[in-house]
Amino acid sequence: MADGLVARLKASLDKTRRKFLAPLEEAVHFHKKISPEFYEELEEILITSDVGYSTTMLLMEKLKAKVKEERAEETTVVQGYLHGIISEILSVAPPPALDGDEPLALLVVGVNGVGKTTSIAKLTQHYSAQGKSCLLVAGDTFRAAAIDQLAIWAERTGVSLVSHQAGADPAAVAFDGISAANARKVDVAIFDTAGRLHTKVNLMTELKKVHRVITQHLGPRKLVNLLVLDATTGQNALAQARVFHEAIGVVGIILTKIDGTAKGGIVLPIVAELGLPIIWLGIGEQAGDLRRFDPQEFANALLG
């Protein structure tokens, strides 16, 4: 990762880092020696940094094992140990298909307002820059504005668009989209979907139908289900991920708005508890601000 991008990532994680690192450094300075009291304070710091209870317990278990293995006594070693543990937890590999030569169908899902359409535009630019042909499919038929927005992005990025009128059956749009992608031998077909609350059973049922239609007509393509999550929602993002994963089998996460929140710690439970890789991070509003996630650099930015 280039130095400039490392600096951007570090700046994006500034609020999260201050929420986590400042109390950690205070605890290290106060306690000096590793003790039950120090561990208790560290647990509280992790939980209040949106790491959550279960993942905090996992981190503490690994940390205590490392301390025992190294026979460490000074609290000054803890930050370095945590860096290694966090890097290890986050090192879940993304689906190989994303970087392969086989044609793709990317189904992009998430609740309202997380940045799905903008993320789709950035994905289009990512693959277009690799010389791959793209097709956008306007599957959010609930809002005419969503179709118009995707049409604007398609025009800006110079790619084709498949769309129906507002109110159309999303599964029918998905069928036309996958059929067009296969007929035109497009490298990457990207399917937008309506933002839906993960608590709305009927909308999740509809999403399963869209997923089923695409799966049945994939042809030579690999289907990759991507969930867009808003980092500012903290633990609620984890609840969303659980429901979408149960519905369609999410294989990777696009985490947006990481630059505007102190809740970046949510990255850890998403990976640790669900086993889902963070694939891209949204670190700004510009076209180039969707960046591939690097566990080592994330740990550096969080703890450095």
Image (cartoon, grey):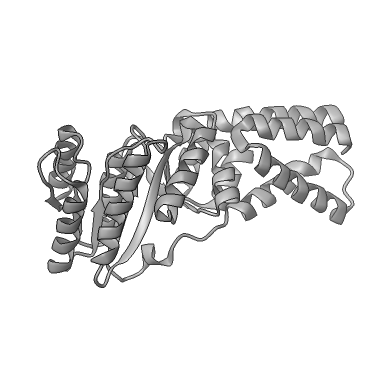
Residue sitting at 46 percent across and 51 percent down?
Answer: 246
| Residue 124 spot, x, y in % from top left | 25, 51
| Residue 273 spot, x, y in % from top left | 59, 49
Residue sitting at 20 percent across and 47 percent down?
Answer: 170
Decide if residue 281 is on the left or right side of residue 25.
Answer: left
Residue sitting at 69 percent across and 40 percent down?
Answer: 56
Q: Is residue 44 visible?
A: yes
Decide if residue 104 is on the left or right side of residue 186.
Answer: right
Quadrant of the rendered image containing residue 18: top right
Q: Is residue 279 visible?
A: no
**Which of the pair 217/191 is nearer the observer?**
217
| Residue 82 spot, x, y in % from top left | 71, 45
Residue sitting at 72 percent across and 43 percent down?
Answer: 57
Decide if residue 111 is on the left or right side of residue 94.
Answer: left
**Which of the pair 17/94 is nearer the observer?**
94
**Which of the pair 82/166 is nearer the observer?**
166
Outermost left residue = 165
| Residue 50 spot, x, y in % from top left | 60, 33
Decide if residue 35 is on the left or right side of residue 185.
Answer: right
Query: Total number of numbered labels?
Result: 0
Image quarter hosting the C terminus:
top right
